[in-house]
Amino acid sequence: MPIVLYNTLSRKKETFLPLKENQVSMYHCGPTVYDRPHIGNYRAFLFPDLLRRFFEYKGYQVKQVMNLTDVDDKIIQRTHEENTTLQELTQRYIQAFFEELKLLNVQPAHHYPKATEHIPQMVRLVETLKKKGLAYESNGSVYFSIKNFPHYGRLSHLDLRTTSEVSRISQDEYSKESPQDFALWKAWTPKDKNIFWQTSLGKGRPGWHLECSAMSMEYLGESFDIHTGGIDLIFPHHENEIAQSEGASGKPFVKYWLHNEHFLLNGQKISKSLGNVLTLPELLEQGYNGAVIRYALICQHYRKRFNLDTTKSMQAAHSALEKLVYFRQDLESIQKKGEPHSEILQILHQSKDKFNQALEDDLNLPVALAALFELIKRLPLPQINQQEAKAILEFLTQADQVLGVIDFHIQHLYSTVDKKRIESLIHQRTEARRQKDFDTADRIREQLLNLGVLVQDLPNGTKWRIKGGKT
Ligand SMILES: [Zn+2]
């Protein structure tokens, strides 16, 4: 089965054919580092991680780049408000961002270029656009001339003919309705204070849209496979990236544009004015670990508007993940020998196929997860022998290569317990039971429960596992 992805450019699902055989080059719009991202932002950062893991699972060699916007209108304002330096402010939040990615088991991208470290590349790009008649100077700033770029509006499906007059805008973010000549290079103004670069374009700083064009092409070349971002970046940000890059290179910039849908928290858009901003550390404080939060954020389809209910969704994510973990632990404890059952292997193959087909169909996570839970439901656990268990476990490990939650959750659970102490208590309890000292056995069971350990007595011995609780 080929991989099919929904391309915003064509508004259709398309078969994925990489520019270079077996290789995937991807660029993702990263955070603007003047604050901690909120939990909704992580949807846009987990989606690229899933894509990367999926392509690697399929045997592709992936090159992944995520930019760090470390200069823009908001950052400059915050720097002055806090009376600090651009570097101090952005470094603080870059570090926090990396720590949080780790807490969500996100595999690090191959490059995290910072805008401030790529000013010469941006200046070169603007110089090229000027030479080609696509950029012009006005009051020390340089703007992109959208009327000279006939393809403008292709991604966002804006019809320029309906716009009688094109105005000019210097802000990084602007109205979603009106196409405007946007700033490539912004002339220094007194409110920028000491934040500026002296270049051939004059004294000033780059515009936000320019950063992504210059840095993606620096690391991935003039044409690459996939560009992702939240749906709110389609216009103007991604539209402007296409104009800058294709305007300068004359080549197609990105083959597949993938956008994740909006995120709602308890039914509302996250915004400072609503006072409902929730950060990852705050959610961790509520007792959910990174694996549970990761699961909650990835289990919906990326193109579906997603409402995270801080109680219901988190609990559902926790119990689903626990089910997967227990399933793995059950399989690991199987020691039964015996003839293979063709029926069990058939169930396994069917689930594998369903799992793969779901992911190949525009990364349909909910359907892929359903295939795993169906497997758990259909398998007759008591009949499974060791060899079959091994085959099922292998599949589970492969699936987790994409999901990144099962092993991560187990690591977290067991990192907080003293395994030696538990094994010793289990041993003492087994001894007490053997001597028919049931009072002591019960007392130890109680003690174990207080440690979050569930004990199960089976014909072939005593099994234990961590009862996750919330964490
Ligand atoms: Zn971007």
Image: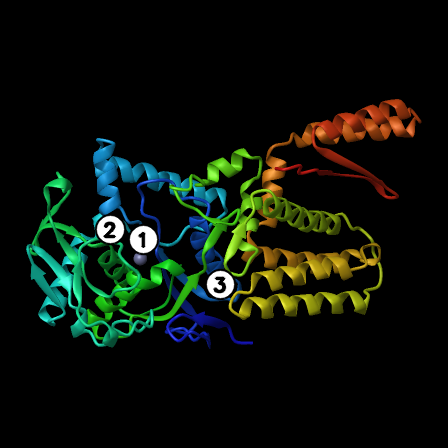
The residue where tag 3 is placed is: 303
**Image check: 216 left or right of 351?**
left
Residue 313, labelled with which disc?
A: none
Instruction: Residue 425: give x, y in percent of width and height.
Output: 76, 27
* Amino acid bearing label 2: Ala
Q: Residue at x 25, y 58 (%)?
A: 209
Q: Are marks 2 and 1 in contact (CB under 8 Å)?
A: yes
The answer as to whether callout 1 falls within 8 Å of ligand 1 is yes
Q: Quadrant of ligand 1?
A: bottom left
* Amino acid bearing label 1: Asn
How far apart, in angstroms, are the residues tagged by discs 2 and 3? Answer: 28 Å
Q: Residue at x 17, y 67 (%)?
A: 166
Residue 67, labelled with which disc?
A: 1
Report the front residue among 428 and 55.
55
In this rendering, the answer to whether 176 lies above or below 106 is: below
The answer as to whether callout 3 falls within 8 Å of ligand 1 is no
**Image check: 248 left or right of 68?**
left
**Image check: 105 left or right of 237?**
right
